Image: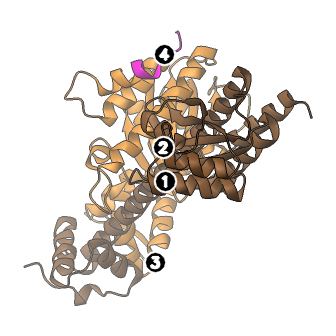
Amino acid sequence: MAKQAQLAKTLVELADTLVADFDVVDLLALLAERCVEVLDVGAAGLMLAGPDGMLHVIASSSEAMRVLELFEIQSDEGPCLDCYRTGEPVIHQVLASGVGRWPRFASEAIEAGFNSVDALPMRLRGSVIGALNLFHEDQRGMTQDDLAAAQALADVATIGILQHRASLEAQALNDQLNHALNSRVTIEQAKGILAERLNVQIEESFGILRSHARNHNLRLADVAHGVVAGTILASSLDAPS
Amino acid sequence: MAPSTRSAILRSIIGKGNGELETQRLCAACAEITGMSGAGIMLMSGDVPRGEVCATDEVSHLIEELQYTLGEGPCVDAYNLDVPVLEPDLAHPGVSRWMAFTPPAVDAGVRAIFGFPLQIGAVRLGALDLYSDRPGALTDDQHANGLTVASIAAQAILVMQAGALGGTVAEQLEISADFQTVVHQASGMVSAQLEVGVAQGLIRLRAHAFGSGRPLPQVARAVVARELRFTPSGTEAVA
């Protein structure tokens, strides 16, 4: 398949994140794989920041790559870290053992067969969620087109991950709201049951539910549920104090 | 009307007040921006209408109430189908639907009605009703604005819920809402009167409302006010 077509196909695959079985690791593994296959990169890897802001290696196109990325994090030095911290691309850095921006990282990388690196931010406007590492055996540097393509792939993956996170948050809030609405229904039903059984006004029956919940250290919704289900009898409820 | 930007819509929702999100302003903005006579927002949970978050006017309120009582209507369909449901001429509809909903809605002056699902991705909250007192389809811009305000409304509702104390509906959502409290209280009372479960209680209430031609909330209020009792042999009006 021609390179353009492969890139287009990859973009579509990366964009499809609003699905039930979405997995961030799978997504980023795909991204790393395609960078190597389509963009003639030696090795690719992705790091994402956790909720605490610490970077974690999520995907690597080879074991050697993974080891180097872990090394970056452990030694707190390397192109991916700089890229993540600044939110800016790190372009065509030629490595020399023991010297330069990342002396220890450079030594390790050269030993593993990599002589130049690029790192691109995973970023949407102000949010930097991680970085894409691209390692090369030679020192030629990537073409403008290839860098642009790599950034586009990283951007699509970023948007997908952020959307997925927002979706999870929305789901949680909606579940909370549904649960609260359902509890309300049960509480109102319980008020009605008590009002009838105890021959009191609705307001008073609410007071009875509340007192009973407080006195027995129960949640109001649980007491209401018991009344509606018939597991708590009206006669067993405490009179309001 | 030109398509409005999300920021313009948000500005009008947050408005001149204290910067707080308010559901009444949200509803009003939905109607203004789409150029409709009125708007109402319905929440659904467990695929059942739970009530209205806000309504701009009496007609919108009626639209929400009818859908709650009858379980049919544009909001219900929009929520179930996950697409906008459009009826540009309610008095002479192209599609035959909402047999019970349509006559009282038309009587109240609704001539066109459009339901937009409230969704954020796969998360479904309910639907937005937009009605006009004149028949006519939505223009492309109005349709686009409808989608935009529905999306903003969904997010606004969840943002408001995020501020709720554990297990409760957020105060901001309660303020202008009608979650059919009286209907549930009455269901409880009827279930105790008839020694049946609450679901049965509600069914009996609905049956009485339908049979007597009275709105369900009205029947419920009568039960709660003890003007109406249910007995195994029927219902009795209490003097």
Q: Residue at x 53, y 9 (%)?
A: B2
**Label of residue B4 in the image:** 4
> Label 3: few (<14), some or many (≥20) within 10 Å?
some
Amino acid carrying label 1: it is: Ile
In this rendering, position of residue B75 left or right of residue A170? right
**Label of residue A81 in the image:** 2
For mark 2, give the secondary structure.
Answer: helix
Magenta-highlighted residues: B1-8
Q: Residue at x 30, y 34 (%)?
A: B21
Q: Label 3: chain? A: B
Q: Label 4: chain? A: B
Q: Residue furthest left?
A: A241
Figure colour scheme: by chain
Q: Position of residue A121 (x, y in %)?
A: 54, 35
**C-alpha separation, residue under disc 3 versus residue under disc 4:** 49 Å
Residue A191 vs A123, above or below: the answer is below
Residues indicated by labels 3 and 2 sit on the same polypeptide chain: no
